[in-house]
């Protein structure tokens, strides 16, 4: 989880190197960064967010990827366009979204935001193509920076997810209306990224229903939406789909026993990662044994336990997630850079 700028501050880059190395030392086999903004236009989501938008970013990230590789692991960068959930951008004063509808709720104080989200500008078709191009160019920079792959952030209420969200997308063109239309930009981004980086580079996508600004959201079309979204994405040149829910083991919709990850397996043809309250190893193993997913990832569980794999292997107790890790500002704390055996 990247929570400090790696762009222009040499000391910040050293912190990032130590931060990611600590997870490798703790036994994690691969790492996925938190969202890095892909362009120097509308994508940045909050001040001090890491980017992969220019040459300085490439140089800084190259040191981080080198440290992770030397420590014996792999690292994937997550490409995130904030859309209507942007609450801090050094390049632009306005924000963009599928329609001119603000995100629900309030901005996040630990990302230095306050008050309601701003009203965005509705994207033109030219804006959409610039976004698609921006993801592709960022993927090329990621490859140059030494990453082992990229993950397209299509989840949690950020721009690509806003196209999927019925109440955030009131467009009447080919990017709005039906679920097939609303998933179109995600497919275009996936295809453009794959073309940009070739076949020898990992490309995945992150998908969710809930959002930073709307925790309880469910797809209006329920399982039918899942079928359209996951089958379409599986044909878009992706290597995996990374599904995240608050609890990955809960049923995705009323009237079904299947989790969202299981629906991705049912309707898709690529490997599925599951995320969401899986730090309990028994819970994670049950999900894997049922065949709901091929891999699991950890968020808060990993932030609390940079050595989670080693703790599970040696049967040590897990630390509970401490909200102070994120607050009052979501920067990397000194205690996160130290692995202890307590």
Image (tube, rainbow, N blue to C red):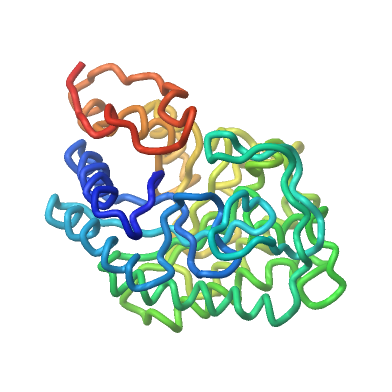
Percent x, y for residue 149?
35, 65
Q: Residue at x 72, y 46 (%)?
A: 117
- The reply, left or right, for residue 21 in relation to residue 215 is left
Q: Residue at x 60, y 79 (%)?
A: 130
Quadrant placement of the N terminus? top left
Which residue occupies the foreground of this view, 314 or 108?
108
| Vertical placement of residue 25 versus 238, above or below | above
Quadrant placement of the C terminus? top left
Percent x, y for residue 151?
45, 61
Which residue occupies the foreground of this view, 192 or 138?
138
- The reply, left or right, for residue 164 in relation to residue 29 is right
- The reply, left or right, for residue 3 in relation to residue 24 is right
- The reply, left or right, for residue 341 in relation to residue 30 is left
Which residue occupies the foreground of this view, 277 or 78?
78
| Vertical placement of residue 283 versus 159, above or below | above
Percent x, y for residue 31?
32, 50
The image quadrant of residue 131 is: bottom right
Q: Look at the image and tell me whether residue 266 can be seen.
A: no
| Vertical placement of residue 268 versus 219, above or below | below
Q: How many marks?
A: 0
| Vertical placement of residue 119 versus 125, above or below | above
Q: Residue at x 65, y 44 (%)?
A: 211
Q: Look at the image and tell me whether residue 54 can be seen.
A: yes
Residue at the extreme left: 70
Which residue occupies the foreground of this view, 16 or 241?
16
The image quadrant of residue 299 is: top left
Percent x, y for residue 116?
74, 41
């Amino acid at each position: 989880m990247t929570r400090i700028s790696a762009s222009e501050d040499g000391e910040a880059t050293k912190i990032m190197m130590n931060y990611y190395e600590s997870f490798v030392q703790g036994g994690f086999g691969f790492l996925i960064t938190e969202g890095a903004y892909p362009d120097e236009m509308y994508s940045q989501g909050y001040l001090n967010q890491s980017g992969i938008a220019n040459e300085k970013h490439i140089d800084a990230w190259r040191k981080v990827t080198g440290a992770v590789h030397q420590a014996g692991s792999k690292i994937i960068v997550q490409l995130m366009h904030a859309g209507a959930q942007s609450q801090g951008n050094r390049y632009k004063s306005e924000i963009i979204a599928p329609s001119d509808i603000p995100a629900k709720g309030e901005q996040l104080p630990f990302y230095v935001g306050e008050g309601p989200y701003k009203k965005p500008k509705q994207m033109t078709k030219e804006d959409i193509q610039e976004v698609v191009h921006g993801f592709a160019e960022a993927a090329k920079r990621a490859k140059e920076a030494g990453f082992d792959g990229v993950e397209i952030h299509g989840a949690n209420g950020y721009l690509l997810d806003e196209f999927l969200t019925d109440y955030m997308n009131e467009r009447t063109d080919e990017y709005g209306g039906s679920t097939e239309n609303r998933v179109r930009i995600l497919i275009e981004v996936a295809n453009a990224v794959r073309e940009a980086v070739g076949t020898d580079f990992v490309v995945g996508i992150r998908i969710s229903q809930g959002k930073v600004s709307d925790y309880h959201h469910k797809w209006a079309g329920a399982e039918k939406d899942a079928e359209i979204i996951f089958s379409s994405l599986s044909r878009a040149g992706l290597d995996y789909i990374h599904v995240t829910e608050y609890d990955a083991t809960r049923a995705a919709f009323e009237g079904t026993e299947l989790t969202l990850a299981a629906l991705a397996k049912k309707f898709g043809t690529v490997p599925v990662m599951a995320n969401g309250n899986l730090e309990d190893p028994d819970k994670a193993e049950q999900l894997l044994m049922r065949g709901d997913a091929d891999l699991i990832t950890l968020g808060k569980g990993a932030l609390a336990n940079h050595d989670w794999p080693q703790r599970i292997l040696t049967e040590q107790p897990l630390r509970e997630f401490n909200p102070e890790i994120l607050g009052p500002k979501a920067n990397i704390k000194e205690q996160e850079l130290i692995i202890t055996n307590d």
